[in-house]
Amino acid sequence: MYRFTLASADLSALPSGALHWPDQRLLVVSDLHFGKSERLARRGGGLLPPFETRDTLQRLDDDLEASGARRVICLGDSFDDLHAAEAMDAADQLWLTRLMAGRDWTWIEGNHDAGPFALGGSHRATCQIGPLAFRHVATAETPEISGHYHPKLRLAGQARRCFLLDAARVILPAYGSYTGGLWSHDPILAGLMQPNALAVTTGKAALPLPMPRERAAGRGT
């Protein structure tokens, strides 16, 4: 994990893509996109193996167990669309319900969904805890924690999801298994993040490095 401080809050970026705030016993994840394979099949798109929900649930289960978190914030786009929430496999829904049980669980509205109301929990556009605001899309109102953009970078020739962080905000990577991403050098992200921003990779280790702001030489992405 990579430990850092934002607005006096001591936070940890986990290799899984989750954010941990130990003092608040809080785990934050973004862009779960449960049901993406079902949504693509329903709309006549490409067929993907229908296992992304279970893979995402397993990683979430592992993170909750390891962190001991009693509070969870999902930063929007938890389901690929609202029908995907209704179409969730009964066994997967039971698994998610079990993870929610006994925890203070908040669903933040995303652009893909307004929150899975049938599953319970709190449903909000934004959430404020201490000095930090939690929302789906970054704004000018900082300090904040957000998601939406699915940031990624290229490291050793491979695309890696990453956190982006500076003294004002953190943008989380997508937590869902079947999600694409926006390169950190994209003008949108370059415009949001301060010049000294860091990128923290996900995967086997949470590795901090200066946020890449230029496209890799010889590559179109």
Image (spheres, rainbow, N blue to C red):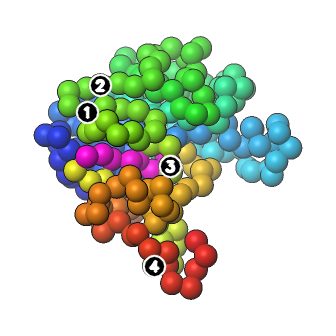
Alpha carbon distance from label 1 to label 3: 19 Å
Alpha carbon distance from label 4 to label 1: 34 Å
Q: Which x, y percent locates residue 196? A: 25, 63
Alpha carbon distance from label 2 to label 4: 38 Å
Q: In the depicted view, which residue is nearer to us: 153 or 35?
A: 153
Residue on which disc 4 sits:
156
The amino acid pointed to by label 2 is Gln
Alpha carbon distance from label 4 to label 3: 22 Å
The amino acid pointed to by label 3 is Tyr
Q: Secondary structure at mark 4?
A: loop
Q: Which x, y percent locates residue 31? A: 52, 40
| Res. 42 visible in picture | yes
Q: Is residue 69 above or below residue 122?
A: below
Front position among marks 4 and 3 = 3
The amino acid pointed to by label 4 is Ala
Residue on which disc 3 sits:
149
Residue located 53% across and 58% down the image: 182
Alpha carbon distance from label 2 to label 1: 6 Å
Pointer 2 with pointer 1, Cβ within 8 A:
yes
Q: Looking at the rendered structure, which numbered label has been put on residue 107?
A: none
Residue located 47% across and 18% down the image: 123
**150 left or right of 194?**
right
Give the mark nearest the N terminus, 1 or 3.
Answer: 1
Give the mark nearest the N terminus, 2 or 4.
Answer: 2
Task: Read off the magenta span.
Answer: 168-175
Crowd class of label 4 (few under 14; some 14 to 19; many from 20; radius 10 Å)? few
The amino acid pointed to by label 1 is Leu
Q: Secondary structure at mark 1?
A: strand
Q: Looking at the rendered structure, which numbered label has been put on residue 132?
A: 1
Q: Residue furthest right?
A: 44
Residue on which disc 2 sits:
128
